[in-house]
Amino acid sequence: MSFNLGNQAAAARVSERFTLKQARVVRKASGYFVRLSFEAEVDIPAVMPHGHPLGIDVGLQYLLSTSNGEQVKRPRFFNPLHRKLKLLQRRLKKKQRGSANRLQLNQRIARVHQRLGDARKDWHFKLAHHLCNSAGMIFVEDLDFRIMAKGMLGKHTLDAGFGQFVNQTLPWVCFKRDVYYAKVDARGTSQECPDCGTQVRKDLSVRLHQYLECGSTKPRDIAAAQVISTRGQRGIENACGDGKRGGWGHSA
């Protein structure tokens, strides 16, 4: 009884601050869920630039490479369940449309896809928290991942969930962890030397950045991540003005 009273008291406190605006019933393979949308008149300040800057470059060989030199291999969520899905979908073709067996098989296929999505989302959130542990500012490239998904490597792009991670998961975790998040111009990040800023042309087959004039030698993706970090910090300088750099520029 005390548990129910506690829940009622908590609900009363919530009702004083929030107004219920929408309730949606969502059907998934594992059951039905209710999504509630609340509204509250609160002023949430934006996260200000501070702390250690971290640039992130995404790719297919490595899901991401950071300006700190860390590289995270791309997980293959689809591979462990690929044969199972292929078998189920092959069996589905033989089932009569509208039959109970076909409906049951469709539900099994939907549950497998939900397992894939849940595993990908869980991994993304853990990775985002890991990145926020070592940074006060995170910068990423401003890319349209829908174009990448239509290319020859579209299957691998969708399996990695680049758009979901960069545009949804990472910004949300940064906001919750008080980490500044921003996007930078993606043009030529892999063609620029991170140490001196000189244009160093190389095609996709060249995986090592090397510029003898300044002695810069490092993996291509890490070099690009360092360029992204520099562009992000330069963008903050331009926005704040030269006289305000001291407010954010000290690394934590």
Image (cartoon, grey):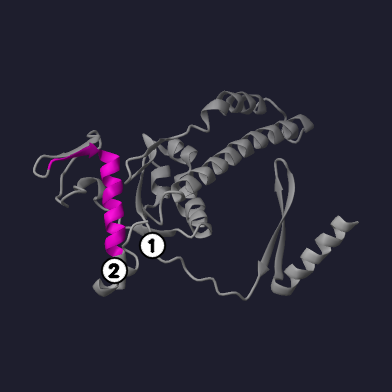
Q: Is residue 227 magenta?
A: yes
Q: Residue at x 53, y 32 (%)?
A: 78
Q: Secondary structure at mark 1?
A: loop
The answer to which image quadrant residue 238 occupies is bottom left
Q: Position of residue 151 (x, y in %)?
A: 38, 40
Quadrant where the N terminus is found in the figure: bottom right
Q: Return the residue found at the far left.
A: 213
Q: Residues within 10 Å of mark 2 (few under 14, many from 20)?
A: some
Residues 129 and 118: in front is 129
Is mark 2 in CB contact (under 8 Å) with mark 1? no
| Kind of residue indicated by mark 2 | Arg
Q: Residue at x 48, y 32 (%)?
A: 76
Residues 132 and 219: in front is 132
Q: Relative to 231, say whether 39 is above or below.
A: below
- Pick whichever of labels 2 and 1 is earlier in the sequence: 1
Q: Return the residue found at the far right.
A: 1
Residue pointed to by mark 1 = 50
Q: Position of residue 143 (x, y in %)?
A: 37, 52
In the shown orientation, is residue 1 left or right of residue 11? right
The answer to which image quadrant residue 7 occupies is bottom right
Q: Relative to 40, say whether 141 is above or below.
A: above
